[in-house]
Image (tube, rainbow, N blue to C red):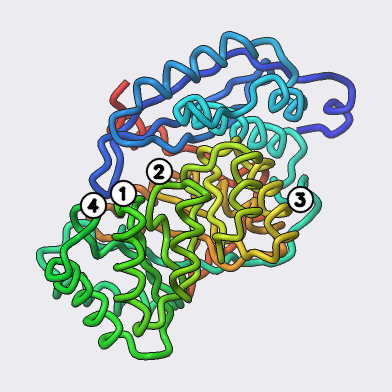
Amino acid sequence: MDKEKIGQRDFQITNVIPITMQAARGYPAWVIVQIQTDVGIEGIGEGFTWSGQAESIADYIKSLGEKISGSRITDIQTFRDRFPTKEENRNWSAAVSAVEIALWDILGKVTGRPIYQLLGGKVRDKIPLYADHGIFSGARDWEECIDRILKAKDNGFTMFKWDPFTGGGTPTPCSLKDQIKKIEMVRSAVGSEYQIAIDAHNRFSVKGAIMAAKAMESYDILFFEAPTVDDTRLLKEVADATHIPLATGELTCTIEQSKDLFESGSLGLFQPEVGANGGILATIAMADLASQYHLKIATHNWCGPVITRAASHACAVIPNLLFQEYAGGAAIDSWENELLIPETKIENGHLILPDLPGLGFELNKDLLDQKRIS
């Protein structure tokens, strides 16, 4: 597009379209958004769609669309101020995040620059990824899961995270021992130098989380994610009882929530979720605040390929980045890579940053039509 024309006019939003589509890794749906402008440029975003919440998130996107139709696409900060995320409403926060990401995509395409350039420029050319239990999708048994972990290691991923637990609350010593055996098997398979982390998806009571942490301490765990509910007092109890660093962030929708977590002294690592915390600018702001507490960042991602790409632009400019989570890699879900044209480039456990405008892709409309729910 002619840069001289860019400076002569303000582009406006004409339509905001939420799309619910089939998801990978056993999730029922993803919600993405298409934002159209009066010059034909389209922006794509995605919100973190919890199981069963797609309809609600899509409805919120529709509501946002009605309010921002006619707005200038350059007014991203105005959008953030007008529609802040809400601690008590993650579906609303996911919708806000999806729209914010799409606005950045449009702005990048209008200016002909990748988003990370608009954010001040990248501090790295490739993003270090860690693999997670998404690679288990379609596996027949635990032995095949271990084989896939070893394959991820061979493919250059220097860390792997999964949830070996079942149930919740306070486990019995016997049931916990059986679950810890999986950690022992993985540690034995990958060797003593390979990094592993454990997710508990907020399942444990404080007592149960401490039991699990103590049982894992001999396996050199990089971090223990979401051991109990994201309550600063309860997390601090767990943190004080173990030398394993705690991590969380998936459910953190506001900067105020993140500050409370940091000030509690309970975390060893923070995991902002670009699809639920307000988007790209919010992720960078949280990472900047985390650096003041000497915390590293490992962005959370259990979403679709649009969020993967959006997170990579934030990660490109975050100095205190440790990892970006990557949930892809299972053969049964390989179709999700084809949703973006060109596909996200993964080499030796790293996401290679594209130099294309905006997020750096166009949607594969044919595949989207095949997977579309509403």
Q: Closer to the N terminus: mark 3 or mark 4? A: 3
Amino acid marked by disc 2: Leu
Q: Nearer the viewer, mark 1 or mark 4?
A: 4
The quarter of the picture where residue 53 lies is top left
Mark earlier in primary sequence (2, 4): 4
Residues under labels 2 and 4: Cα distance? 36 Å
Question: Which residue type does callout 4 highlight?
Answer: Gly
Query: From mark 1 to mark 3, how far is it between C-alphas?
Result: 29 Å
The answer to whether the residues at label 1 and label 2 have Cβ atoms under 8 Å apart is yes
At horizontal 22% and vertical 74% (from top left) the residue drawn is 180
Question: Depth check: 287 or 323 in front?
Answer: 287
Q: Residue furthest bottom?
A: 192
For the residue carrying disc 3, how many other residues have a C-alpha within 10 Å: few (<14), some (14-19), or many (20+)? some
Q: Which residue is mark 4?
A: 168
Q: Nearer the viewer, mark 2 or mark 4?
A: 4
Three-letter code, disc 1: Trp
Q: Secondary structure at mark 3?
A: helix
| 1 or 3: mark nearer the eye | 3
Q: Which of pointers 1 and 3 lies earlier in the amino acid sequence?
A: 3
Residue position for label 1 = 335
Q: What residue lies at 35% left-to-right and 85% top-to-bottom?
A: 218
Disc 1 to disc 2, how far (Cα)?
7 Å
x and y percentages locating residue 374 in the rendered image: 32, 20
Q: Which residue is depicted at the point 65% across and 19% down?
A: 37
Q: Which residue is mark 2?
A: 339
Q: Residue at x 54, y 18 (%)?
A: 16
Work out whether residue 144 or residue 346 is closer to the camera in this orientation and state it: 144
Residue beneath disc 3: 117
Residue 342 in sight in this render: no
Work out whether mark 2 precedes mark 3 in sequence or the reverse, and give the earlier one. 3
- Work out whether mark 1 precedes mark 4 in sequence or the reverse, and give the earlier one: 4
